[in-house]
Amino acid sequence: MYEIHVVQPGDTTKSIAEIYGVSESRLIIENEINNPDNLVIGDTLVILYPEITYTVLDGDTLESIADTFGITVMDLLRNNPYLSNREYIFPGETIVISYKGEKLRKISVNGYAYPFIDRGILRKTLPFLTYLTIYNYKVMGDSELIDIDDSDLIQLAKVYGTAPLMSISAENTEAAHLILNSKALQFRLIDNVLKKIKEKGYYGLNLDAPYLFPQDRELYLEFVEAITLRLNEEGYVVITTINQGTFELLTGILEPGFDYQRLGRIVNGVMLITYELGFTIGVPVGAISFDTLDRLIAYVTSQIPEEKINFGISTIGHIWQLPYEEGVTRGQSITHNAAVALAGEEGVPIQYDVNSQSAYFRYVENYEYIVRFKDARSVDAILELVEKYKLNGIGVWNIMCYFTSMWLIVNSKYDIEKLL
């Protein structure tokens, strides 16, 4: 049970707390409001209603409190994320045992991270994750893997009951073409992947589907079938990521002639990630309506069983200089927190585009700029699609910065599946 409050002129944390009948201190803590005296107009705050709270006593530990209430330490960390980077809890502080409202169901959550992710952010996020996909091993044309420094991430994920997934992708389309047209290179790649999974202690594989030459699409499916069969025999799962950019979303074309039904039968899971807010180069932001995402999911679920599909939430927004000039204008990536801070610094209100379900604002600094990003309303709308089509869960590209509103909503609506 949660509500989303859009900050209005004159709002304070005290006045907002009074409107909803909640504690001002909890409102600040839960939404991680860094400057309570200077709220940004148009920003969104998630209002939660604690059902059971507990005041810490001398000698208490998270384990003892969890045992007392018949819950898990992961439940405590999801309800009190700020505790993730704390070595101790202190007598007299209040922690939330549970919030009001029934959760809809259990879902799978996959988070993508680079090896250099801040460990504090990672520890804070892991309680919410079923899988941690570590991005990524590049595959060269000779089927060799470029190693990454991922060992401590794998071990940390397991401490939090999160299953680490090895991620691979071809260095480029030409490398993919070479491998797909050589059975010897494919067998070598499968051996290399399996060896690395065992060596590093991964739970399975996340296969990032590359752009393929049209003549290689059938060969790619044959390779996916071969590597899935081999890894499944060894007890490992295989999930494939389908990335959809603005061109595919606008045209409604995923990949002409690609057999998604067969792909869905082969793999253990599919991660569908869309970039409806654009890339740093490409179609300008705001071009993709939310109805387009709805139609995309409708199509994908007609080809692949919904229980195998996780729908991706891209946490990356963009700043674009105006006027937009095709092929010339470049966007700059920005996180939710940075976007809200920028709106505050520029003294401009955040607005919301219902058509694309994205927050945005404009500001002038020598040139005019537009910033588009996801906020709590965006996340809420995406999760409504997840429920509409009863998908297996969500994926988050990426978790390098902690998106407070998103995790508050996810935790309020769902139980998180844990495999370890």
Image (cartoon, helix red, strand yellow):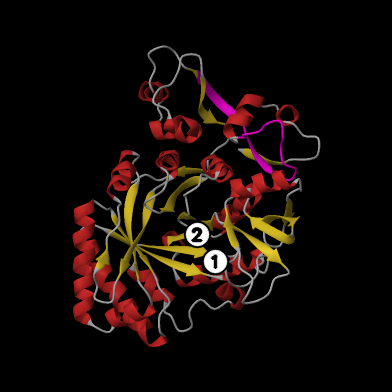
Q: In the rendered structure, which disc, 1 or 2, sits on the residue that comes first in sequence?
A: 1
Q: Which residue is tagged 1?
A: 297
In the shown orientation, is residue 47 left or right of residue 199? right
Residue type, numbered disc 2 = Phe
The magenta segment is: 33-54
Q: Magenta includes 337?
A: no
Q: Foreground residue, 168 or 407?
A: 168
State if disc 2 and disc 1 touch (CB < 8 Å): yes
On screen, residue 172 above or below 317: below
On screen, residue 74 above or below 286: above
* Residue 23 visible in the snapshot: no
Residue at left 62%, top 69%? 292
Q: Foreground residue, 47 or 82?
A: 82
The image position of residue 74, as x and y in percent, is 40, 35
Which quarter of the rendered picture does the N terminus lie within? top right
Which mark, by number, is residue 219? none
In the shown orientation, is residue 158 left or right of residue 261? left
The image position of residue 369, as x and y in percent, is 71, 60
Q: Quadrant of residue 71?
A: top left
Residue at left 33%, top 78%? 176
Residue at left 62%, top 72%? 283
Sort mark 1 into few (<14), some (14-19) or many (20+) by Cα contacts within 10 Å. Answer: many
